[in-house]
């Protein structure tokens, strides 16, 4: 059993958990600063940290996105949350868990009043083509399958953050007033904890559900796959979480790659 940090943030979060989610939570650690909440839980998993453990941080000094990119993580205003889950065996469609996690985040934000929320494969959360957040799932295999899901959301970013090299926004800009971090974290966990608990038996068609939020749907894109740029029309995702692209050679699927939307000429 993990240790629950005593703090007002944690108390508010736990009070806001649903009756379904609360028994699935092993514990919460709230840290003022850490290199990366994902790194923290991956290391803790090696020493037996329980499934259902959560790490929250006020600040990350080395937050990570996909492909080792630095995730800008200024102190005080944003949400940095990671969840550890253990499976005795890798569940079916394990790769699709990233898609399911993105859907959980998008649905949570929609329910909080964020209209026109979008997901850009594989892990970006967008609003009006501006980056609002992202997620990073990391797995470790051995005697069991360990998954750590990290979520970062911009809540109150400093207005002049020149270190970010793409258009971005935050929840305060979108909603006018941002929900308190503990309550937002609780709403996310109310979706994520049951999702991860039931995922091996999950029968939702995540590929079809993705279409509601798909930022790439029917867009002309270029995907950099293993160093080779390929062009086509995005056609959603499959149940394995792969991007489907209509190319001149036919329909192809991609499990990874850097995607850009091609500008109209």
Image (spheres, rainbow, N blue to C red):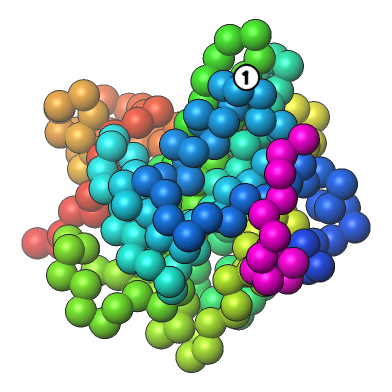
| Picture residue at 30% right of the left edge, 70% below the top | 168
Residue nearer the viewer, 147 or 3: 3
Please tell me which residue is depicted at 48% across the width and 46% down the height of the picture.
37
Q: Which residue is mark 1?
A: 145
**Residue 172 seen by the camera:** yes
- The segment highlighted magenta reads 1-12
| Quadrant housing residue 52 | top right
In reply to whether residue 201 is colored magenta, the answer given is no
Name the residue nearer the viewer: 208 or 151.
151
Percent coordinates x, y for residue 73 in the rendering: 34, 60
Q: Which one is nearer the viewer's eye here, 73 or 130?
A: 73
Left or right of residue 229: residue 188? right
Q: In the displayed image of the protein, which residue is found farthest to the front? A: 6
Q: Is residue 212 visible?
A: no
Q: Quick check: 185 above or below 254?
A: below
Q: Position of residue 64 (x, y in %)?
A: 34, 44
From this view, report whether residue 36 is shown above or below residue 152. above
* Number of numbered discs on residues: 1
Q: Position of residue 231 (x, y in %)?
A: 20, 39
Q: Using the image, determine if residue 173 lies above or below residue 219.
A: below
Query: Residue 28 location in percent, x, y?
Result: 67, 50
Point 50% across, 29% down: residue: 43
């Amino acid at each position: 059993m993990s240790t629950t940090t005593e703090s007002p943030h944690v108390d508010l979060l736990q009070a806001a958990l649903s009756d379904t989610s609360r028994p699935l939570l092993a514990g919460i650690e709230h840290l003022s600063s850490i290199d990366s909440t994902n790194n923290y839980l991956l290391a803790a998993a090696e020493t037996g940290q329980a499934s259902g453990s959560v790490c929250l941080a006020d600040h990350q000094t080395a937050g990570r996105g996909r492909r080792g990119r630095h995730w800008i993580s200024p102190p005080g205003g944003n949400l940095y949350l990671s969840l550890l889950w253990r499976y005795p065996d890798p569940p079916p469609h394990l790769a699709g868990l990233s898609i399911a996690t993105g859907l959980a985040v998008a649905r949570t934000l929609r329910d909080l009043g964020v209209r026109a929320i979008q997901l850009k494969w594989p892990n970006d959360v967008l609003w009006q083509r501006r980056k609002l957040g992202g997620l990073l799932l990391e797995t470790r295999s051995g005697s069991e399958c360990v998954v750590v899901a990290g979520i970062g959301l911009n809540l109150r970013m400093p207005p002049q953050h020149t270190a970010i090299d793409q258009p971005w926004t935050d929840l305060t800009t979108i909603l006018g007033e941002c929900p308190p971090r503990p309550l937002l974290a609780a709403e996310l966990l109310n979706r994520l904890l049951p999702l991860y608990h039931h995922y091996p038996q999950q029968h939702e068609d995540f590929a079809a559900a993705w279409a509601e939020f798909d930022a790439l749907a029917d867009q002309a894109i270029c995907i950099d796959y293993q160093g080779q740029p390929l062009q086509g029309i995005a056609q959603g995702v499959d149940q394995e979480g792969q991007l489907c692209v209509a190319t001149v050679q036919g329909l192809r699927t991609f499990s990874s790659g850097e995607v850009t939307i091609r500008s109209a000429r």
